[in-house]
Amino acid sequence: MNDLLDLSRKIDPLSAALFTSVSETVGSLGIAFFVVGATARDMIFELGHGRPSGRATLDRDFGVRVESWAEFAKLKKSFLTSGLFQETKDVQRLRFQGELDVDIVPFGGVADNQGTIRWPPDEDVVMSTVGFEDAYRAAQRVRVKANPPLDILVASIPGLTILKIIAWAERPPARSRDAIDLAFILEHYLDAGNIDRLYEEHLDLVDAEGSDYERAGARLLGRDLAKIAAPETIKWIKEILAKETADEGRRSLLIPGMMPRGSVFDEESGNRFNQLLTLLLALLRGIYD
């Protein structure tokens, strides 16, 4: 998971400047960070393996591990005093050089025992950070600048899968983009440097999944996810997937959300529904493996 992925020739100048500024600012405070969200998706899939998702993102997402809200406030102040970032109306969002929206999500000591954070001062914005520690520990090291070299951590695909499932389950109607991203990840996991691993390390999946390579890839993803997730995270993921795939998915909210056209059951979308159901079931089998 932690082999260096060199993207230094593929990162656009504005993003490179952002990564440099974030790295310098958090580094000066001794705070750990990693790239998450659609930014991580595009860096690994599109820039790393030539597989674009087809869903554009206009912001950049980071997770920062802090011990307290006071430490997070100090970090945010450092961003703002640099002159490169401006505040926005959203508590977690800054704007870089007047062009890029940047979401900074704290995790670690600011979360309660259930992994929930409540933004001060009013605690009216509530978010789950379940899975962030798992994803951080398994993050992929990525080179974003060559001269001088700058390496940062980016959520690996199994880590990103955990974050997508948890984020969707927190607010299903409002998190359709996470469901759509999950569908993309399940369908293209083998395309992200995992086809050789399938044949060299997990050949049993080819026969077990009837030579269906998408299902084999989804099940391999489940196995990889299970290796990096803490027991409590695994419990959450299993419960979410079991609920969403029960009774052939008849009561599922996730599967329709994974379909951009919704859950209208003409012949084409009905086939799509069943395809996504089989991939979720394969993912769940891989976690149980």
Image (cartoon, rainbow, N blue to C red):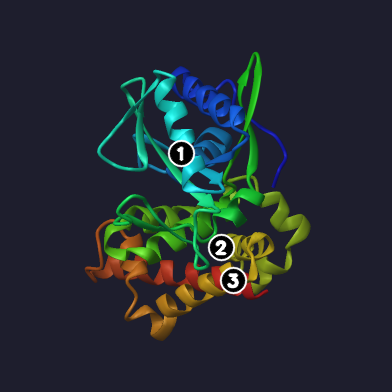
* Label placed on residue 232: 3
The one of 226 and 131 positioned closer to us in this rendering: 131
Q: Residues within 10 Å of mark 2 (few under 14, many from 20)?
A: many
Identify the image quadrant of residue 213: bottom right
Task: For the residues labelled 2 and 3, say whether their Cβ atoms are less than 8 Å apart.
Answer: no
> Distance between the Cα atoms at labels 3 and 1?
26 Å
Give the percent coordinates (x, y) of residue 251.
32, 80
What number is the disc on residue 218?
2
| Mark 2–mark 1 distance (CA, rounded to whole Å) | 21 Å
Q: Amino acid at mark 1?
A: Thr
139 relative to 35 in the view: left or right: right
Question: Eyeballing the image, is 3 above or below 213?
Answer: above
Residue that appears at 42% across and 22% down: 81
Q: Secondary structure at mark 3?
A: helix
Quarter of the image where one finds residue 223: bottom right
Q: Nearer the viewer, mark 2 or mark 1?
A: 1
**Where is residue 137 shown, x and y percent of the image?**
66, 50
Q: Residues within 10 Å of mark 3 (few under 14, many from 20)?
A: few
Q: Nearer the N terminus, badge 2 or badge 3?
A: 2
**Which amino acid does the dot numbered 2 rest on?**
Ala
Residue occupied by mark 1: 39
- Residue 107 x/y as whole percent: 51, 51
For the C terminus, give its image quadrant.
bottom right
Q: Amino acid at mark 3?
A: Glu
Q: Residue at x 27, y 69 (%)?
A: 267
Q: Is residue 84 above or below residue 126?
A: above
Does any portion of residue 121 appear in the rendered image?
yes
Q: Answer yes or no: do the residues labelled 2 and 1 have beta carbons within 8 Å?
A: no
> In terms of sequence position, does the residue under pointer 3 or pointer 1 come before the other?
1
Assign a secondary structure to mark 1.
helix
